Image (tube, rainbow, N blue to C red):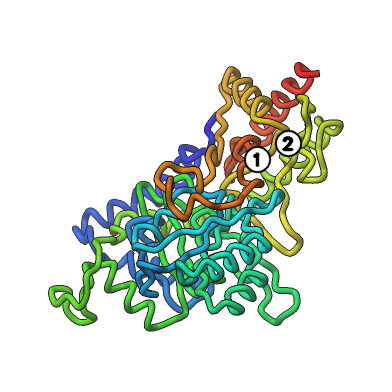
């Protein structure tokens, strides 16, 4: 079984993908070919923003956004403690200080009370100037952007949406005339990654930046190509980087974007719903409906907490992540799955504020008990739009077997 079945996806899309690659090779437009601009417009239209600027990877996308705002030395950027390293690495790489914030136990996304506490702490300390919040759409579900936006407005902070895992997720804006808004449209600047295992992935590295701001878009396009001027790439207006999405990857993404919109987003939500139903049906005595239940037991109580999607939210299901009551139980289940040739992953094993890269810095002073607990208890199961019910049944039956062994 594949953790995310990219082989099956390629088999289904093979003729179109192969033709798209051959078109690029025949044209010899390997860098900045027409497919790049076409893809950027298609992505901007899908997300619902004015500008999409493609780049080399999701990490560069975040860095480019921070550079457009001039964030650097002496600035504080607020980042979830439970996320992939690049969310905190990028502020540090431009000279700013990442300040880590705890997350909710049910959605894994930024906890708003913890965010405001961290902002007040930084203001009170007076060592750094609060400048921005990086909110992460973890595992596919958008963060709570209405509430995050209110906090950013209150403290005059930029909002960057890290949608590396969230592309395709959405929030139904039931109190307005907007209908549903897509992930990568909620930030002043938003970013995503096209790493192969992401909801929309290419066959290598790739990323994109989204914004409605014309001036920031121009800056980001410049920074992404060595700081080039608008009219002449050999007349450099500023110090930038080399961060371009190559034409072959853009051509592949054009094919995969059509499949994502037409079929895959619905399919992955059906797969998640089947997991939910099967786990509740076969493990009903061991499902903890309250997200805080797991991890509170001193013994090996076999509680499983399923992923929680907020009302009016839709996930793109980058991961299907359950919680177990302890590290021992989690590790035991992972070993049981592995013994039966079922892949699983732990995202993430170590809080950001405990990473060695931030040792002995202000970033290490975070108070994030929920993140510390989640790192001991989460386990991501095989997932994706091409996960069939027989595969899901095999995973669920093995989980049920493991619980019975423990009792």
Which residue corresponds to mark 2? 295
Left or right of 268? Residue 93 is: left
Q: Which mark is residue 334?
A: none
In the picture of the structure, the residue carrying the numbered disc 1 is 373
Question: Mark 1: which secondary structure?
Answer: helix
User: Would residue 353 appear left or right of 397 to someone viewing this image?
Assistant: left
Residue at image position (70%, 34%) is: 324
Residue 251 visible somewhere in the drawing: no
Quadrant location of the N terminus in the rendered image: top right
Distance Cα–Cα, label 1 vs label 2? 7 Å
Q: Is residue 18 above or below residue 125?
A: above
How busy is the neighbourhood of tag 2: few (under 14 within 10 Å), some, or many (20 plus)? many
Q: Position of residue 5 (x, y in %)?
A: 51, 38
Label 2 secondary element: loop
Left or right: residue 318 compared with residue 56: right
> Is residue 265 shown left or right of residue 134?
right
Q: Say if 335 sits above or below 19 in the image.
A: above
Residue 153 position within the rendered picture, expressed as x and y whole percent measured from the top left: 59, 79
Q: Nearer the viewer, residue 359 or 139?
A: 359
**Residue at image coords 59%, 40%:** 383
């Amino acid at each position: 079984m594949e953790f995310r079945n990219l082989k099956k996806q390629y088999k289904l899309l093979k003729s179109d993908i192969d033709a798209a690659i051959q078109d690029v090779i025949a044209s010899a437009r390997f860098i900045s070919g027409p497919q790049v601009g076409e893809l950027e417009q298609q992505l901007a239209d899908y997300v619902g923003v004015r500008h999409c600027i493609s780049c080399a990877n999701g990490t560069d996308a975040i860095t480019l956004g921070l550079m457009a705002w001039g964030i650097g030395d002496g600035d504080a950027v607020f980042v979830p403690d439970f996320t992939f390293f690049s969310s905190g690495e990028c502020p540090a790489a431009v000279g700013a200080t990442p300040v880590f914030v705890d997350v909710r136990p049910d959605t894994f996304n930024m906890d708003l009370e913890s965010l405001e506490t961290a902002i007040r702490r930084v203001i009170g300390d007076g060592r750094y100037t609060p400048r921005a919040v990086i909110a992460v759409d973890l595992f596919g579900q958008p963060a709570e952007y209405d509430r995050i936006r209110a906090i950013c407005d209150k403290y005059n902070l930029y909002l960057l949406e890290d949608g590396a895992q969230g592309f395709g997720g959405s929030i139904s804006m039931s109190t307005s005339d907007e209908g549903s808004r897509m992930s990568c449209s909620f930030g002043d600047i938003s970013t995503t990654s096209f790493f192969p295992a992401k909801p929309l992935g290419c066959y290598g590295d790739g990323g994109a930046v989204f914004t409605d701001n014309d001036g920031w878009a121009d800056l980001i396009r410049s920074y992404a190509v060595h700081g080039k001027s608008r009219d002449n790439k050999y007349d450099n207006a500023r110090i930038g980087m080399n961060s371009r999405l190559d034409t072959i990857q853009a051509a592949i993404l054009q094919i995969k974007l059509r499949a994502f919109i037409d079929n895959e987003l619905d399919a992955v939500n059906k797969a998640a719903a089947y997991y939910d139903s099967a786990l509740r049906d076969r493990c009903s005595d061991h499902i903890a409906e309250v997200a805080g239940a797991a991890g509170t037991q001193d013994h090996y109580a076999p509680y499983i907490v399923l992923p929680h999607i907020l009302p009016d939210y839709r996930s793109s299901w980058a991961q299907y992540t359950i919680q177990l009551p302890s590290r021992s139980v989690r590790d035991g289940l992972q070993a049981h799955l592995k013994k039966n040739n079922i892949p699983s992953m732990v995202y993430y094993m170590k809080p950001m504020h405990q990473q060695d890269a931030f040792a002995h810095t202000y970033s290490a002073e975070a108070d994030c008990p929920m993140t510390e607990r989640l790192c001991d208890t989460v386990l991501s199961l095989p997932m994706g739009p091409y996960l069939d019910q027989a595969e899901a049944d095999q995973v669920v039956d093995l989980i049920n077997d493991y619980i019975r062994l423990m009792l």
